[in-house]
Structure formats: structure tokens, C-alpha cells
Amino acid sequence: VAAPTARVFFALWPTPAIATQLHQLARDAAASDARIMRVDTLHLTLAFIGDVAVDRLPAIEAVGDQTVWPRCTFHLDQLGHWPHNQILWAGSQSPPDALANLASELSSGLQTIGIRLAARPFVSHVTLARRCRHAQGKAFVPIEWAVEGGVLAVSHRDASGARYEIRRRWLAA
Ligand code: 2AM
């Protein structure tokens, strides 16, 4: 019998107030037939681990325990669209260094427990919509996301898309 697995990732999870603003932006900017992310699913992935045996989760959580979670402001002033995967996303023209440093700290921590992340470079972004063929309405009032910690999330996928469960939360020092 195969060992049970879970699909997990470290992420920043917005407060409901910030998620509501992001969701409004998604509705304004996404193509009408795009699949807009539900308000409770909006997040920023810091380190995507993917499927792991559930008995690895305590070690992964220990990486989160050893990480210094920064306090910073993520000034979301940019809309992006990636044609190759049809993702509409929100980001920043000047993301705080703290975010890239955090992603790299998590990546190094995971390496020490034998988990190597895909080599793709970290691009801080919040996916707003999928299956989006184009973006519209580029001008918007920037969203000020006060980052005060992060999470380890578990992705459960079914026919209706993904549902995320927050397994652990860490607060900034
Ligand atoms: P995306 O929104 O840009 O698609 C849960 O699936 C989260 O992990 C999403 O934020 C998704 O990013 C990200 N993700 C999924 N597969 C990934 C991969 N191979 N590398 C990096 N991030 C990934």
C-alpha cells in the first residue's frame, strides 16, 4: 500500500480585508470567461514543495519553525498576465527584498531535510485568475498588504478546483 501523501507549500496568506481587495481586482481585470480564484484561496506561494509523504510533514514544519518570518509591506501595484499558463496575477514593481530572502531561506531549510525545490526563480505574485486569455483594466489603486507571518498550506484538489487547508501559521517576530 502506498504511503499517504499531501501536496504542500509555504505561502503568505492575506487577511480577509486584503483578500477582498484582491478579489475585486480579479473581477475587474480578468477576462469574462476566466476562472477567478475564490476569495478564500488567494495567496502568495513562497516555496512549492508538492507531493510528499505525510510522515515528512513534521520535518517540513520544523523548517518553518526555524525560519525568521519578516514583517514587511507588499505594495501590490502591478497586474501581470502570463500567456503560457493563462494566469492573471498581481505583484509589485518593487517587491520587498524580505520576500525573496524568505523564499530562499525556506528553500535552503528544505534542502537540509532533503527536499529540493524546482530551480525556477522566485517571482512574487498572487494568482488572481486561471484560464484567463487576456487582462483588461490595467489601472488600479495599489493594495498595501502588511505581511505579518506565513503559513504551510495543504492543497486538496477535486473536480471543482483546489481547496486549501492551512496546516500551520507562523507570526513575524
Ligand atoms: P500559481 O498560482 O502561479 O499556479 C498551489 O498550487 C500554489 O503553488 C499556487 O500558488 C501555484 O502557483 C504554486 N505552484 C504550483 N505548482 C508549482 C510549481 N511547480 N512551482 C512553483 N509553484 C507552484
Image (cartoon, rainbow, N blue to C red):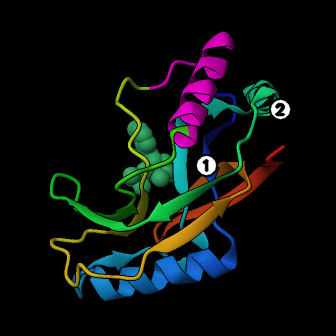
> Relative to residue 91, is residue 111 depicted above or below?
above
**What is the magenta range?**
98-117
> Relative to residue 41, is residue 167 depicted above or below?
above
Q: How many marks?
A: 2
Q: Which residue is mark 1?
A: 11
- Residue at the spot 60% in from the left edge and 75% down from the top edge: 18
SS of the residue under disc 2 = helix
Task: Tell me which amino acid carries mark 2.
Answer: Asp
> Relative to residue 114, is residue 41 depicted above or below?
below
Label 1 Cα neighbours within 10 Å, binned few <14 / some 14-19 / many ≥20: many
For the residue pair 47 and 124, the one nearer the viewer reads as 124
Task: Tell me which amino acid carries mark 1.
Answer: Ala
> Where is residue 126 drawn, in percent x and y?
45, 60
Q: Which residue is mark 2?
A: 65
> Where is residue 123 drawn, in percent x and y?
38, 43
Is the N terminus in the top left, top right, bottom left or bottom right quadrant?
top right
Q: Mark 1 and mark 2: span between their CA atoms?
A: 14 Å
> Does any portion of residue 51 appear in the rendered image?
no
Is 105 within the magenta?
yes
**Mark 1: C-beta under 8 Å from nearest atom of ligand 1:** yes
Label 2 Cα neighbours within 10 Å, binned few <14 / some 14-19 / many ≥20: few
> Relative to residue 170, is residue 63 depicted above or below?
above
**Mark 2: C-beta under 8 Å from nearest atom of ligand 1:** no
Residue 132 is left or right of residue 70, and the answer is left
> Where is residue 29 drawn, in percent x and y?
28, 82
- Residue at the spot 73% in from the left edge and 33% down from the top edge: 54
> Where is residue 47 drawn, in percent x and y?
54, 37
